[in-house]
Structure formats: C-alpha cells, structure tokens
Image (cartoon, rainbow, N blue to C red):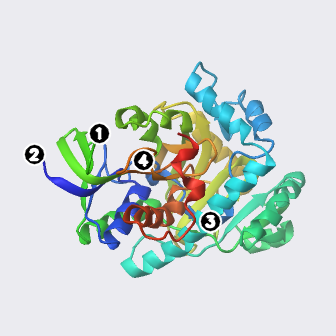
C-alpha cells in the first residue's frame, strides 16, 4: 500500500504554504502538492499589499448598479463578460443578495478579524523566520482626483475606525506636497498608516524555503485528481500515483470549485467564482511613490519594492473580471491600468516591462474566506475563497487552519468562515 502522510496540503500558493508552515510548527508532518509550480497562481502577480484597511467587502450597497453599468465597458475596473453561464449567474444572484448594509458590515467584521490577525502575525513571521521578501511598514494611501468621490470614500471611515483601523484624511495640497510622484489636481487622500507591503513572489518563495527547512515536503506538477474517504483518513489519487493521508487541507484557490465534484464537495461550484486580475511589472521609473497607492476612481494599485532611492520593482495591478477561466491576456485591460496611472502619476510606467500577468482570484459570493472542516467529512479541511486578500490573510489563515486541525483553541473566532454557510 502507498505510504501514508500525516497532512497533505493541496495548493502551494500563499495560503497553502502558510497553512503548511503553521501545521509544521504545531507538530504535524506536512506534504504540499501543487498542480503546477510553487506560487504559480494569483500569489505571483498581485500587488503585495498587506491591508487591514481593505476589510469592507466587494459585496457592498450599490455594487449591483455599478456592475450593471460596467458590463457595457470591457476595460472597466469591474467587468462581467455577458455569456450564458448558469453557475455564474447563480453566484451573481447570491452575491447581489449580500449587497446590503447588514451583510456588508457582517462581512467587513469577519474580514477585519482575519486581516488584523494576519498583519500582526506576518510581521512576527518575517522576524522569526528571516523572510527575505521586502516587507515594509509603508502604510497605504487612497488617492482621489474627484471631490465627490473623495467625499463618498469618507463614508466608510466610521466603520473602519470601529474595526481598529488607523485612518487619516488628507487634503489635496498636503497630499501633493508629501508625494512628489503625484500630478497636480489631487482632491484628497485617505491614509491607512497600519498597512504594509511586501514582494509577493519572494514571500511565497521564502515560505516554501522555511517549510522545507522544517521538514515539510513540496511536490510540484502533481495535480490532485480525486479522493475518497476512509475511516481513519483520506485516499488521494494524483497524477504521480496514489497517496493516503490522515488529514487533507484544500488550499487550491480559484481551482477549488473545479476540484469540488471530484472530492465530494460539488457545492463549491456555487460558492466560488474565479475573478480575473491583471498586473504589469516594470523596472523602476526615476520617480516612484513613497508608499503603495490606490488610485480610487480608476481602481489601480501602485506598488514599488525597496525604497525611493533603491527601487527594485514597480507594479500596476488590480481590475476584476468575471470571465470564467478564460486564459487570454487581455491587452485592453492591461492598457487600462497604464491609462489610469497616467491620470495620477508623473511617471506612471517604468522604462522596461518585466512581466504582463493575469491570474484568477478565488471569489466567494460573500467575499469572506471559506476556512474549516468540510461538512460531513471528518478529515478534509478547507482554506480557500480569499478573493483579493490571499497574501494579506495568509498567515492568519495558516494559524487558524493549524488550530482547527490540531483541535486547539483558535486564536480568532472561526464561525464567520465556516464552510457550512454554503453547503
């Protein structure tokens, strides 16, 4: 019979590797499987911001009307490609039902709990494990050029302060004086000094290094094909052959709903959709922002690694496209990132393009991660559905998974993340 593993983690992205590390630190043996390479999914090309400030969910009051307007604009920040897809439309219907004040606030509270825990835990991990990932306590600014949008953006400040987030409102003239990279015409900014940033590809590589150094095994290019449940564990079928495990953690991001029917969780297809995001990475222009920026009216995130005097990379990212697993690199949506940045920045792009990227984010229909034991399955655990917050929620998710699997008292309340809410 094939060798029995203690814990198999399916997915070598940021959430899977963080879960593997926390499980190892809790005394469990871990083998991580991935269908491709370490960090090859949405962990690779995102902007690397660590943002408790992003607790308010995408499912917000007024979002349905916004999405309907944007459906006619293929390069809009939020785009739903019109097509006959009953699974997508069912997901959108559930998402739309959440776009009310009560559910919006409940999701924000849940996300904030995990984001705040992760923010503190990540800093501890960087120090404890010596993670070389350009981690910096930069803060982050939301930049507005439209006074009406600036006023509207301040409507969330009361909730954010309730969540313990440090928020500062800055007038346009002060913002321009503090940030030379910005063009004149700034209406104002909202600053979140508790946010941070890192280089996501290096962070994932460093997590993999630490997992291996502590005895974990990572197997690339070995997709999970199916699993069956036994009295004392799980039997897995993979491309490299059969395996057995005492426990399995599914941390496969946007691919989780595709695996759902093969692992006895068909409801994952109703709970999640892939949200396609884009980014462009450049060599650094001479003038880069001092901290990460969100250019609010255009929904473009701007990050630079290193510091203004020694910048090692410059990235524009964001957008949300619901087009299934379409694998085309949409040049029109990439160009929208550059056009948006050009409205705000003196030097919106770098001299050389290093990478044009797209990836699928795992979007749950309430924009809250799915973390916990799979309903009715003793040895299968879920850590997926993190949307755009996978990097920022990674360390807290890893610790919560380790606490639940080992039966310890969780460091945060697991109730808002329970998979039963969808099953």
Label 4: how many Cα within 10 Å (few below 14, some 14–19, many 20+) = many
* Image: 322 above or below 171: above
- Please say whether residue 369 is visible from this viewpoint: yes
* Mark 1, residue position: 227
Closest to the observer, 394 or 368: 368
The residue to which callout 3 is attached is 113
Q: Residues within 10 Å of mark 3 (few under 14, many from 20)?
A: many
> Does the rendering let one see residue 287?
no
Determine whether the residue tagged by mark 1 lies in a helix, strand or loop.
Answer: strand
Q: Nearer the viewer, mark 2 or mark 3?
A: 2
Classify residue 178 as left or right of residue 256.
right
Q: Which mark is residue 41?
A: 4
Q: Residue at x 64, y 23 (%)?
A: 82
Q: Do the residues labelled 1 and 4 touch (CB within 8 Å)?
A: no
Label 3, label 4: how far apart the Cα atoms are: 25 Å
Distance from the alpha carbon under mark 1 to that under mark 3: 32 Å
User: Looking at the image, do the residues carrying marks 4 and 2 touch, with CB atoms under 8 Å apart?
Assistant: no
Q: Which of marks 2 and 3 is nearer the N terminus?
A: 2
Mark 2 lies on a secondary structure that is: loop
Q: Mark 1 vs mark 4: which is more N-terminal?
A: 4
Q: Please tell me whether mark 4 or mark 2 is closer to you in this view.
A: 2
Residue 101: % across, % down: 80, 49
Q: Which residue lies furthest to the front in this view?
A: 231
* In contact (CB < 8 Å): disc 1 and disc 3: no
> Foreground: 214 or 227?
227
Q: Earlier in the sequence, mark 1 or mark 3?
A: 3
């Amino acid at each position: 019979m094939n060798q029995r593993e203690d814990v198999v983690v399916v997915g070598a992205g940021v959430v899977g590797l963080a879960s593997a590390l926390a499980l190892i630190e809790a005394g469990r043996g871990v083998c991580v499987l991935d269908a491709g390479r370490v960090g090859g999914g949405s962990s690779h090309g995102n902007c690397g911001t660590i943002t408790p400030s992003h607790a308010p969910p995408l499912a917000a009051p007024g979002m349905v009307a916004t999405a309907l307007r944007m459906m006619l604009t293929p390069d809009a920040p939020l785009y739903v490609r019109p097509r006959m897809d009953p699974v997508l439309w069912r997901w959108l219907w559930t998402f739309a039902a959440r776009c009310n004040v009560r559910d919006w606030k409940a999701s924000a509270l849940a996300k904030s709990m995990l984001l705040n825990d992760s923010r503190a835990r990540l800093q501890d991990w960087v120090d404890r494990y010596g993670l070389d990932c350009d981690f910096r306590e930069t803060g982050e600014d939301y930049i507005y050029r439209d006074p009406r949008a600036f006023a509207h953006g301040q409507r969330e400040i009361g909730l954010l302060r309730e969540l313990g987030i440090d928020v500062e409102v800055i007038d346009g003239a002060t913002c321009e004086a503090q940030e030379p990279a910005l063009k004149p015409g700034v209406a104002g900014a909202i600053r979140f000094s508790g946010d941070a940033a890192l280089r996501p590809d290096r962070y994932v590589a460093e997590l993999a290094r630490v997992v291996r150094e502590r005895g974990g095994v990572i197997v690339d290019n070995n997709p999970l094909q199916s699993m069956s449940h036994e009295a004392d564990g799980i039997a897995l079928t993979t491309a490299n052959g059969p395996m057995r495990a005492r426990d399995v953690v599914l941390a496969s991001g946007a691919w989780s709903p595709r695996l759902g029917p093969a692992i006895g969780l068909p409801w994952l297809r109703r709970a999640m959709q892939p949200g396609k995001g884009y980014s462009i990475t450049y060599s650094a222009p001479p003038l880069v922002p001092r901290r990460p920026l969100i250019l609010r009216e255009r929904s473009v995130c701007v990050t630079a690694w290193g510091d203004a005097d020694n910048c090692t990379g410059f990235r524009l990212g964001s957008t949300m496209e619901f087009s299934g697993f379409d694998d085309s690199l949409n040049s029109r949506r990439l160009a929208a990132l550059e056009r948006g940045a050009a409205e705000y920045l003196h030097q919106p792009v770098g001299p050389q393009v290093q990478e044009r990227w797209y990836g699928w984010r795992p979007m749950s229909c309430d924009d809250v991660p799915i973390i916990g034991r799979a309903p009715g399955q003793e040895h299968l655990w879920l850590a997926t559905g993190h949307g755009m917050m996978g990097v920022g929620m990674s360390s807290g998710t890893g610790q919560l998974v380790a606490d639940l699997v080992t039966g310890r008292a969780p460091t945060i309340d697991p109730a808002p993340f329970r998979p039963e809410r969808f099953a």
